[in-house]
Amino acid sequence: MIDNSFIAEVRSDMLRFAQLQLRDAALAEDAVQEALLGALSGERSFSGRSALKTWVFSILRNKIVDLIRVQSRTTNVSALGEEGASLDQAFEELFKTNAHWRPDTRPRGWGDPAEALREKGFWDVFEICLNHLPENTARVFMMREFLEFDTTEVCQTLDISVGNCNVILHRARNGLRRCLESSWFAPGEKPC
Amino acid sequence: MLTCKEATRMMSEAQDRKLGAGERLKLEMHLSLCRGCRNFRQQMDFLRAACRRLVGRDEPGQD
């Protein structure tokens, strides 16, 4: 049941996951390798493929958390604000002066989202959009969404305020949704 | 009355913490009148679902 082709498949998922978050191919490769070796050399037995996958991913998640803690010591906190400037400006431009949506930038309905999640092409676009986010903005977003830190933990780890964290998450989410809206949820239909 | 800009901030925070009763009331009132913000909320939920799927927390029932 757990054969080499399954391991190869999990490995490539892990690599993608690690690279998105670490943005460093060599570091990601190391983390994945260690996580896999750790998981497979253990005494644990697995009831199936998905149990194994969950297990190796939880090991990988911990490795990434450790690496992020180390990296965050060298993160320049003030850079978090600066790198978001262009996303913030783009966000402001979505609104009229009274802070309501401009008719042409109003968020559209995305139809049946479950359908998008089933399509392979969607995941490529999703990855591209994540990689488009400025590095530290993406870092905060992925700590929250992929590593499932709560915002307090994110703040403590990166030494930023809760307010700042909320701003960054909002910025990231809006950036991502705009990227997906223009790159996947094809324009053409008028917002109603 | 919330502006759309304020509503988006609140909807983002709702992904991270439980909003207070007053906040929820204000937001729901706004959403009942604003299709753009209702779409925004669905998009936020979609992002959460996509992230869960990507990390394998919410696999479709296959394998």
Image (tube, rainbow, N blue to C red):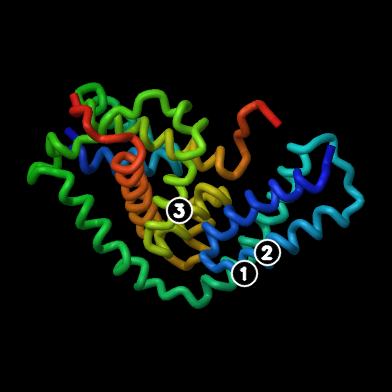
Identify the chain of the residue marked 3, using the numbered disc in the image.
A
Q: What residue is shown with label 2?
A: A31
* Marks 2/1 same chain: yes
Q: Secondary structure at mark 1?
A: helix
Q: Are circles 2 and 1 on residues that touch, CB within 8 Å?
A: yes
Q: Secondary structure at mark 3?
A: helix
Left or right? Give the position of A77 relative to A99: right
Between tags 1 and 3, which lies in front?
1
The mark nearer the N terminus, 1 or 3, is: 1
Three-letter amino acid code at the position of disc 2: Ala
The image shows residue A188 at horizontal and vertical percentages of 22, 32
Q: Secondary structure at mark 2?
A: helix
Identify the chain of the residue marked 2, using the numbered disc in the image.
A
* Marks 2/3 same chain: yes
* Marks 1/3 same chain: yes
The image shows residue B35 at horizontal and vertical percentages of 23, 26
The mark nearer the N terminus, 2 or 3, is: 2
Q: What residue is shown with label 1?
A: A27
Relative height, residue A69 to residue A182 (above, below): below
Q: What residue is shown with label 3?
A: A141
Three-letter amino acid code at the position of disc 3: Phe
Three-letter amino acid code at the position of disc 1: Leu
Relative height, residue B25 to residue A15 (above, below): above
